[in-house]
Amino acid sequence: MPRGFFITFEGGEGAGKSTQIARLATLLRDGGKDVVVTREPGGSPGAEAIRHVILSGAAEPFGPQLETLLFAAARADHVDRVIRPAIERGAIVLCDRFIDSSRVYQGLASPEARDLVAATEPIAVAGAMPDMTLIFDLDPEEGLRRAGRRRGADSVDRFEREDLDTHRKRRQAFLDIAAREPERCIVIDAAADAETIETVVVSAVIAALNARAEPGKDGA
């Protein structure tokens, strides 16, 4: 059976990743593809339990290093129980956040946390690296406004409530990753309307899937 295809969606708060994942999943399923939609932190029962601890802010007083370890533990369970089995059966996996979010969100917290992210990443991922990463780029002020409208009366999570300067640094960190790894990462202008973004996303994904299906390559 051909190996599947693993796509991750990255970016700051309110960039519209979830909307585009849902649209892409519908299109691919309508085309007969086996599609798995998942997210981080979370995606498996063990990882979802850790997600609650992280996003509630309960781990924040213990510092970025503990948060980094929690993310790594959640990712290891997620990869083992959801992502790798799906890829091995030939599915297309669409994941809302993955390794790049850890590199950005925890990696910017302190030099020690950055080193810990790098040290734990190979263990947590265990070879299940994304084939493609779409980075949704949006001005943080607009992203936070969008996130606020989406959230409504719900409480602000651990990451949304941080200051604007921190969100700006994260935006730049995502762009830096894209510049370092252009063969994997595509930057998407998330300021455009949803239909325009969908067209760009679908075009990029279909091109990548067609390239994978060329003779001599593993199909998705």
Image: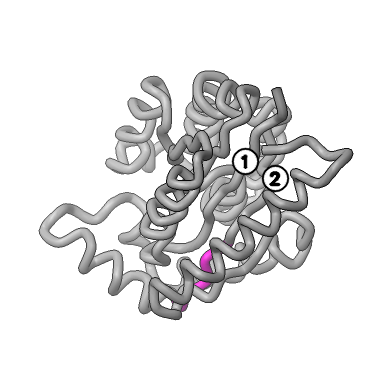
In the rendered image, which residue does mark 1 sit on? 6
189 in magenta = no
| Colouring convention used in this rendered image of the protein | one colour
Q: Secondary structure at mark 1?
A: strand
Residue 135 appears at what percent x and percent y? 57, 62
Q: Which residues are magenta?
A: 135-139
Classified by dominant secondary structure, the portion drawn in magenta counts as: strand
Residue 109 visible in the picture: yes
Local packing at callout 2 (Cα closer than 10 Å; few below 14, some 14-19, many 20+) is: some
Local packing at callout 1 (Cα closer than 10 Å; few below 14, some 14-19, many 20+) is: many
Give residue 122's mark. Answer: none
134 lies above or below 146 = above
196 lies above or below 213 = below
In the figure, residue 151 lies in which quadrant? bottom left
In the rendered image, which residue does mark 2 sit on? 131
* Amino acid type, callout 1: Phe
